[in-house]
Amino acid sequence: MAELLKANIFADLTYYRRSKLLLAFLVVFLLLTALLSLPPLFMNSGVQNFNSLQQIISNLNFFLILLSAGTGLLVISSHLRSRNLKMVFTKPCTPAVWLLSAFLSAALLSLFLDLVVLASSVLLSVLWHLPVRMGLVFVSLETFTVSLGVIAYLILLATIMHPALAAIVAIIFNAELFYDFQVWTQGAIRSGYNNWALHLVERIFHVFYIVLPMFVPFEKQTQNIHSSLRVMSGEWKYLLYSLGYALAVSAFCYCTALYALQRKSHT
């Protein structure tokens, strides 16, 4: 099993390396980073340098999460659309091993890019004469844990529906969005719009909020770290909680995707 897992991971990483779509996305990464790095070159201000560093880290981590979602989506949908899984599963590579290797390869790529972003952040801090704060490490590790959940969710969606539809569902059906909707309906109810339809909608939003995965489960507790890049000793626990939540979501998505994959016809 270990050899099959290793072979599949290597094949997936080769696919990522040759993908023109992922390459184009990385080029956009570099262009945006270069544009955001321009202000400190012309302004000798510590505050401006810190604000630029913070913005660069935020944007790169956001794009990194999007790229992680894209890798999970592409590695599954490309095989399903080419209809070559029957040959893969008779080699003998079981669906469980193949699906696990897809998740691990996407996670490895995400970890590599996350380390690149962290190293770049430390380098910019040194070049701009800013203190290298532990918040850089915390934000990078948190981004990786978020990427794990996003990868697993997109792998599940790609297994059961068309990749374009999977991307749309991932954007619309997420816990954060339905939480905002629930807060809005609760505010409307408290303002006097007290009718059965609004209560029903509020309940529906609450159910979706509970059922759907949260990409950043402890965002409120860690948002100050993102703005100051400082970590208090008692805040590291949220990183561990986030990892546990991401692994739980990944395990659920893996088992559900495996069940859907086994019931598909791969002829």
Image (spheres, rainbow, N blue to C red):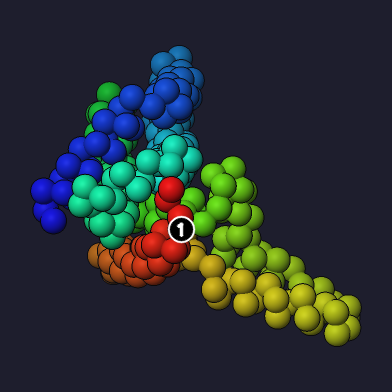
In this orientation, which residue lies closer to the viewer: 229 or 177?
A: 177
Q: Residue at x 44, y 63 (%)?
A: 263
In this orientation, which residue lies closer to the viewer: 216 or 222?
A: 216
**Residue 222 in view (yes/no):** no
Q: Position of residue 28 (x, y in %)?
A: 47, 24
In this orientation, which residue lies closer to the viewer: 155 or 133?
A: 155
Q: Picture quarter containing residue 176?
A: bottom right
Quarter of the figure that contains the N terminus: bottom left
**Residue 201 in view (yes/no):** yes
Q: Picture quarter containing residue 148?
A: bottom left
Q: Position of residue 183 (x, y in %)?
A: 69, 71
Q: Residue furthest top?
A: 42
Q: Position of residue 130 (x, y in %)?
A: 30, 33
Q: Is residue 66 above or below residue 220?
A: above
Q: Residue furthest left?
A: 3
Q: In this rendering, would 201 be left or right of 66?
A: right
Q: Neighbour class for label 1 at 10 Å: few (<14), some, many (≥20)? A: few
Q: In this rendering, would 12 be left or right of 44?
A: left
Dot 1 amino acid type: Lys
**Disc 1 element:** loop
Identify the residue position indicated by label 1 in the image: 264
Q: In this rendering, would 107 be left or right of 173?
A: left
In this orientation, which residue lies closer to the viewer: 48 or 260?
A: 260
Q: Residue at x 28, y 66 (%)?
A: 240
Q: Residue at x 64, y 76 (%)?
A: 206
Q: Is residue 28 above or below residue 181?
A: above
Q: Is residue 126 above or below residue 102?
A: above
Q: Residue furthest front?
A: 267
Q: Position of residue 146 (x, y in %)?
A: 39, 55
Q: For the image shown, how many numbered marks are present on the structure?
A: 1
Q: Residue at x 22, y 43 (%)?
A: 9
